[in-house]
Amino acid sequence: MPFPFFNAHHSPVGAFATFTFGMKGPKGGLGHELAGPANEPIYIGVETIDGGHYQALPFYGEAHTSAENFDVEGLGDMQFTTAVKPFADEDIVRNFGCAVDEWCAGDLSFRVYSPPQIVPDPKGEDARHVLTPSLIVELSVDNRKGQHDRKAFFGYAGSDRTVGMRILDEPGMVGIGQGTSIAIATEDEGVYAGLGWQPEAILNPRLNENLGFMLGSIGLLVGVVPAGKIRTFTFAVAFFKEGTATTGIETRYLYRRWFNRIEEVLQASFENAESLISEAHGFDDALANQLQGSRRLMAAHAIRSYYGSTQLLEDRLGRPLWVVHEGEYRMMNTFDLTVDQAFFELVMHPWTVRNVLDQFVERYSYNDGVRFPGDSEIHPGGLAFTHDMGVSNAFAPATRSGYEQAGLTGCFSYMSSEELTNFVLAAGLYISHTQDNDWAQSRLETLLACLQSLENRDNPRSDHRNGVMGLDANRCAGGSEITTYDSLDTSLGQARNNLYLAVKGWATYLVLEHLFRQLGDESAANRSLLQAERAAQTIKGAQDEDGMLPAIMGEGVESRIIPAIEALVYPKVIGIEIKDSELVNVLKKHFETILVPGICLFENGGWRLSSTSKNSWLSKIYLCQYVAEQMLDQEEDNRADDVHWSWLMDDDNAYFAWSDQMLQGKAVGSRYYPRGVTSVLWMAKGDRPLRQIEEHLAGNRVKCESLP
Amino acid sequence: MPFPFFNAHHSPVGAFATFTFGMKGPKGGLGHELAGPANEPIYIGVETIDGGHYQALPFYGEAHTSAENFDVEGLGDMQFTTAVKPFADEDIVRNFGCAVDEWCAGDLSFRVYSPPQIVPDPKGEDARHVLTPSLIVELSVDNRKGQHDRKAFFGYAGSDRTVGMRILDEPGMVGIGQGTSIAIATEDEGVYAGLGWQPEAILNPRLNENLGFMLGSIGLLVGVVPAGKIRTFTFAVAFFKEGTATTGIETRYLYRRWFNRIEEVLQASFENAESLISEAHGFDDALANQLQGSRRLMAAHAIRSYYGSTQLLEDRLGRPLWVVHEGEYRMMNTFDLTVDQAFFELVMHPWTVRNVLDQFVERYSYNDGVRFPGDSEIHPGGLAFTHDMGVSNAFAPATRSGYEQAGLTGCFSYMSSEELTNFVLAAGLYISHTQDNDWAQSRLETLLACLQSLENRDNPRSDHRNGVMGLDANRCAGGSEITTYDSLDTSLGQARNNLYLAVKGWATYLVLEHLFRQLGDESAANRSLLQAERAAQTIKGAQDEDGMLPAIMGEGVESRIIPAIEALVYPKVIGIEIKDSELVNVLKKHFETILVPGICLFENGGWRLSSTSKNSWLSKIYLCQYVAEQMLDQEEDNRADDVHWSWLMDDDNAYFAWSDQMLQGKAVGSRYYPRGVTSVLWMAKGDRPLRQIEEHLAGNRVKCESLP
């Protein structure tokens, strides 16, 4: 198991940027808008106490001198003897938090601060402080036992293929970087910057004037720790993208409001450093107060991965656009992620949930007919939403996703019905948490259209409706809709008559009823209630004699699935009383019956979402754990937590930071993924879950400081 | 031998951009500011005459579907059966010119047009037409024998790691691209664009609405060729970089004056297409009139590689900065390349030579002392120039290069003395060709400083001077200066007392004399003449009894080097009469004696620049061939030409387009390189070489068309 050597994100919010590291070798780096780690060598080290040699954290590989491409016969005298060696694994300790990641080895300690912060709506407040696209890093050396001054260093070898490494030329700071987009700098006294093919050329330059060797692939910042002293260096790690950020919709990063050059970002970072560091410690303390063991580690890890995928843009009219990229896939604002991430986002920046919902309504919705399976007749359908808004910085055309393809029955088919439920559920979460009644009122029409569309997707004839989706979108062109479990077998992959989606539909109708009553539309509320009752009836009616429910109702698919219980989360978090306790009992019975080895537990005790598949999604396990514990009276399954953490720590998985989709413990898809923030629900043990999380994580801490 | 399957550049001027292709497999692509080929699959093909299947030029590999990263258990139904096959090698014919590269296979022909064009000084004239950063491409299918309509296609899979492929959304055109920086489009009727993981998904989409699959890595443009017809599609291939182009000096691409979006570049390309195509044919005809066989091929290939490295910027005040990147090394305006490329640049855009010289004087020059070898006493030196101006879009600090390192005796040491000669020689070439007397006058002081510095680098005592560089720059800090042959052994690597540099110094003094007389400074002219005479005397005095000259004079290095004759090119091209015919005869005798197998000919007849090294530079061979033929009465050595071409066509070399440095025929350094434009001298067979080349290549052709 690679602990502590696993990659984790360290990211500012909204910059689609990350300092990923933790794996041994050149497997991390400063990644900007990437689908995975940048695979750059990172150098963090200190001179040995007896001098002349160096020890470094093991985040680099063989220094690759390119001299042989110039000096083809090896006649030159540029080469340096290796003087930097990695610390031994057993001498390295990692204190891994969500906001502080600390590495200690020998006399050296290294800390990266990237605290989750409340992001104010940039419409109203000045969010410059929070949205500065940078991290703060500290490198400390305890040289109290040292007889000599010792050098300490931090740097990297950039992988941007279009620009070379450079030394910054900015008054008041010393820095290195690549182009206009990535830089590391310090304001500390006496630090020097150097470039070279080998770290030794910078650490032990034969002549100082050689430090500006711009062909060098490595840049280091080097400071001196006096004999007998402890010294801590503070670095800012900044990301900056200057020009057009996306196509399809022309945008720029919102931080461009305040910053024109990366040097300005660095400057602002130094100004923020102190408060950022204290905020980071505060966050990790709060998290540790609430979660322990594998849960704390998983939540910390998952939240980090979430931030690495966040991107805050503004269009040409200055309107903010919040985007979460889908990890390794980089699909933008995938709706079935949005709904899961909403629990966390509502605590940290509720306006982004509204922002994404508005983007869906205004550009990524469409009207469509529906069809019975195997039948070409088109019945009225109604409003639906796209799966996503595009891929890798390219916004999709209006009404289209980057993912969905017609004519399929499996992966890449449409998710129209599930995205419909996702709109209602996310809107319900947002409205209940923020009490933003103006927005609720403004979206009444959309909600009515959702209800209509959901009804139509159940059955064209009102008297034939059973509350469960029974018709596929006409956009499928004869194919079948799928669910967010797109690569799972039929048990969770097929949308039609799916137990998971049926419960989610039931919850959606409950939320609609709740919202319509609040908005004063009793008739729509009653229609919603009727559909909820029908759905409950259908689900309860599907229970077999062993107390289990089939994955696909009425189609002879007898797989057993954990996510049957998932959607119970929505009435709970929104604060809707579930009057149908029988349904809850049926789901509870189902859950208790299937959560056993041979059905929905792997042999090692890990949760298996479907009895007929080895494919599990951690984000969904976390969500179902919350439901099980808070609504179905189950104990915390900490043995399972340890197994789930061990999946993330698998030799092959640890490279991808937090990953969602695990095929019998191997991250095979949905890697480097943002969705695991469902884990914050673990800390909500009372009646108002989001308020509780808010109090734990965001309550007493510094909010955005308005800067001029 | 891989002919015709070798990579070649196809580049607009000044965009540091290239459509490189020709190697089989995904070994070329649309490269922007890269050190080598982009390694992207390129798809160029046509439906078979019987329909359903496709044949394509072999510039792609196995289509790499990423579906397995999503559909981890392979349950989906997205896969397409392979329907695209490469044409058989023997069915492919390439007509390779400098401006037109045509590929014919079966009924398909494919032409890329990238004509070298006169670039006017953007200060005075509107250069929009010439500086539009794009290429024109034609794809023709002869379907006269076809009974069915057939699809034809062109596209690629982009390698930019931060943005996904996209379909352009621009009225009047259909296109694909990546982000804001690379795009291919057409205005032709009925062409459609599609994205997918496999070309088949775009060529044979099951449903047309699936063509917008933004997860797809491949983008194709597909048109239909009616049965019984020939149809030609016209595409524009555009490059665009929006933001800050360089650090160190903040610049943008000069074409940003006219273009704000890549779509505007495409638009302008279509407007230019017709004249560009006719210009391309005109250029290739002119070239073919002058050069045949391997010489024509090498010149065409080399000129292409030159353009791929060119970059025209402007600073914040709107002042143009001309940069040639150094091929795979991407050093900017390496001075020892500038002087070689000047022969070509003066014909095509003389103002860029002045522009680069001005950059050297204003920012990349310095004053330095000099030292005798092994002695730490510093004697007065004087003006010198840096080796380059930075690396890979990062300008170096003023007075510093990216390359030079102190304390060395070999590769990466200083080239101060040779760069001094390069300034004088390039200035002399520029002034004589353009008759720009104002500039000459404005640089009189610099030329005087060059003379002073050259004298001081000969010997501190005037009466000890022998016309040859004898002291190393103090910046070497005790090391030794080198020459442009930086990775060759002492015979060409060491600057001090080097025969090659001595003759170059002699030529430099002659040019200085010429310029000072022209500028009315008789005293400086006489000083220059004296130094030229001393140099000639030293060189002649070094002749041994066999009529050969030693590579290092007076130091017992008896290697024999061809570049002894190289610098004869300068008086010839500038039009300075060489009064010392004895020197020419000594050099001629030397050359004739060494150009034999066992000394400076490889066994196969290729030229070997130094008898003690296997390292040769093609650009320098071309230059020396010109001198040998036009000044030393040698026949064209076409056997050697064929060998040199065969080096470029070597299995391992063909990937790097035109490369300079060959270790016994293998391109081991200076690959993907701009310097081979010395080959244009081959076509200068009279007394005014540059005028001749100008008449051949640029004389009767369209000049820049001013557009509104």
Image: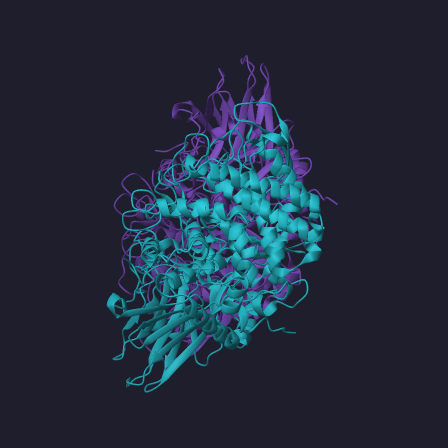
Chain colours: A purple, B cyan
Instruction: Indicate left or right for A215 with B110 as reference.
Output: right
Count of labels in the image: 0
Q: Nearer the viewer, residue A218 or B128?
A: B128
Horizontal and vertical percent for residue B479? 51, 29
Horizontal and vertical percent for residue B598? 29, 42
Q: Is residue A597 above or below residue B76?
A: above
Q: Nearer the viewer, residue B18 or A348?
A: B18
Instruction: Indicate left or right for A427 with A405 as reference.
Output: right
Asked where in the image residue A356 lies, by quadrant, the reply is bottom right
Specify the quadrant that holds the N terminus of chain B. bottom left
Looking at this rendering, what residue extends furthest in the right direction? A708
Q: Is residue A549 above or below residue B459?
A: below
Residue B15 visible? The answer is no
Name which residue lies at 59% across and 18% down: A226
Q: Is residue B101 above or below residue A638?
A: below
Horizontal and vertical percent for residue B63? 32, 61
Horizontal and vertical percent for residue B353? 59, 55
Q: Nearer the viewer, residue A654 or A348?
A: A654
Specify the quadrant that holds the C terminus of chain B. bottom right
Asked where in the image residue A247 lies, by quadrant, the reply is bottom right
